[in-house]
Image (cartoon, rainbow, N blue to C red):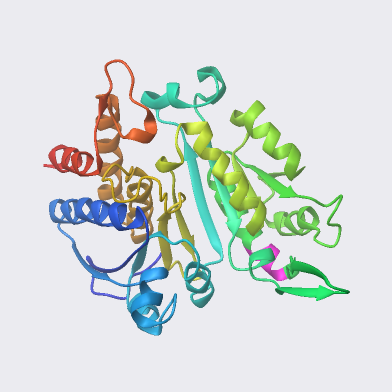
């Protein structure tokens, strides 16, 4: 658990909306955060910063130093979305190596999944993704050989990087149902022995069962038998792709949040969706993914009562049939926009 550097029960949040719907869902979620802080008698000070294209246009850099310093003094970073630059630099700057992406079905939304209700009932999966190494951070470039242009990206993992994310995943599995699935592609990438390295770390966790699974088969099994899975650990690329499948399982990628933590528990909290340019600026974006991320931040701070209150409020709103556009309201369900959903939260919390 992260120990905030500020005085007890007073937290500093660096808000980085970025681009697209990030500029809508981050302020929406922080309005709700401030409300629950008021109710639960703790203080939150929010400072906004630039990242991505807006930062490039105004400050000449996707991740300017002034934004880095804003984050440095915070107890948590609430992030929206960017199209190109800034996010990888942010993750690397603070070594946010452990990305946690929970996928849990809401009973009231069980009909929104692309799978049959009996296939997804009770789903509770935690993806643990290594976030600051692998192919996104390896050597890359464009070149030409005998007038044939080519590009390359290098997937490099040090054994210690695999082992440290393995320990996070093993700790989480130990706290849950005790099953850890290792996503790998060792038949084609034998120099990246994820399964062996995870099993070496698992000697300290005798109550956790470790199963290695080829990533292509794992993707298929997530659709065929998602109820099997508990904790899934993966490298940067595979974890990115597999965890997005969680959106299809629960009904919308707009529902899913994440926390990316470093070794001292300091973190960035963001929904796993992107900028969604097709709906940006229309006021219809679903903020529930960012709200889920804020809930994870509260849990990391130890504000468990506040986190539980937000979860209960969300469940009641969904049970009453309120739906954002991405959840495709039907029948007696009630379509709401971003602002209306925020108002519903504020009413529930009052």
Instruction: Work out whether residue 41 or residue 108 is closer to the camera in this orientation and state it.
Output: 108
Q: Which residues are magenta?
A: 160-164
> Residue 166: which quarter of the image?
bottom right
The overriding secondary structure of the stretch rendered in magenta is helix
Question: Residue 39 at x, y = what percent?
Answer: 14, 51
Vertical placement of residue 348 versus 185, above or below: above
Q: Nearer the viewer, residue 199 or 313?
A: 313
Q: Position of residue 71 (x, y in %)?
A: 36, 75
Horizontal arrangement in the rendering, residue 206 relative to residue 110 (left or right): right
Quarter of the image with the N terminus is bottom left
Residue 9 horizontal side relative to residue 295, left or right: left
Expressed as whole percent of the image width and height from the top left, the position of residue 188 reads 85, 52
Compared to residue 124, the image places residue 195 above or below, namely below
| Residue at screen point 56% across, 66% down | 97
Total marks shown come to: 0
| Residue drawn at (37%, 79%) of the image | 72
Outermost top residue: 331
Q: Quadrant of residue 132?
A: bottom right
């Amino acid at each position: 658990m992260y120990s905030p550097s500020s005085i007890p029960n007073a937290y500093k949040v660096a808000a980085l909306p970025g681009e697209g719907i990030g500029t809508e869902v981050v302020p929406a979620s922080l309005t709700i955060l401030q409300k629950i802080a008021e109710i639960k008698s703790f203080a939150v000070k929010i400072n906004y910063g630039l990242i991505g294209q807006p930062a490039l246009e105004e400050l000449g850099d996707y991740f300017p130093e002034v934004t880095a310093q804003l984050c440095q003094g915070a107890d948590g970073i609430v992030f929206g979305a960017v199209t190109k630059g800034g996010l990888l630099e942010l993750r690397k700057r603070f070594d946010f190596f452990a990305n946690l992406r929970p996928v849990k079905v809401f009973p009231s939304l069980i009909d929104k999944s692309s799978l049959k209700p009996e296939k997804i009932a009770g789903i509770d999966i935690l993806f643990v993704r290594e976030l600051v190494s692998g192919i996104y951070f390896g050597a890359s470039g464009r070149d030409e050989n005998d007038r044939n242009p080519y590009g390359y990206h290098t997937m490099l993992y040090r054994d210690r990087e695999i082992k440290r994310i393995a320990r996070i995943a093993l700790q989480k599995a130990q706290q849950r149902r005790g099953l850890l699935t290792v996503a790998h592609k060792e038949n084609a990438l034998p120099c990246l022995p994820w399964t062996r390295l995870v099993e070496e770390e698992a000697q300290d966790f005798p109550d956790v069962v470790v199963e290695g699974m080829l990533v292509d088969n794992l993707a298929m099994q997530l659709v065929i038998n998602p109820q099997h899975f508990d904790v899934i650990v993966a490298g940067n690329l595979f974890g990115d792709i597999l965890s997005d499948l969680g959106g299809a399982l629960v009904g919308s990628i707009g529902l899913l949040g994440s926390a990316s933590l470093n070794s001292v528990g300091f973190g960035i909290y963001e929904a796993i969706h992107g900028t969604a340019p097709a709906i940006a600026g229309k006021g219809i974006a679903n903020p529930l993914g960012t709200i889920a991320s804020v809930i994870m931040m509260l849990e990391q701070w130890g504000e468990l009562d506040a986190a539980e209150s937000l979860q209960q409020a969300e469940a009641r709103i969904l049970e009453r049939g309120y739906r954002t556009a991405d959840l495709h309201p039907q029948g007696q369900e009630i379509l709401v926009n971003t602002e209306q959903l925020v108002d519903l939260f504020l009413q529930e919390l009052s």
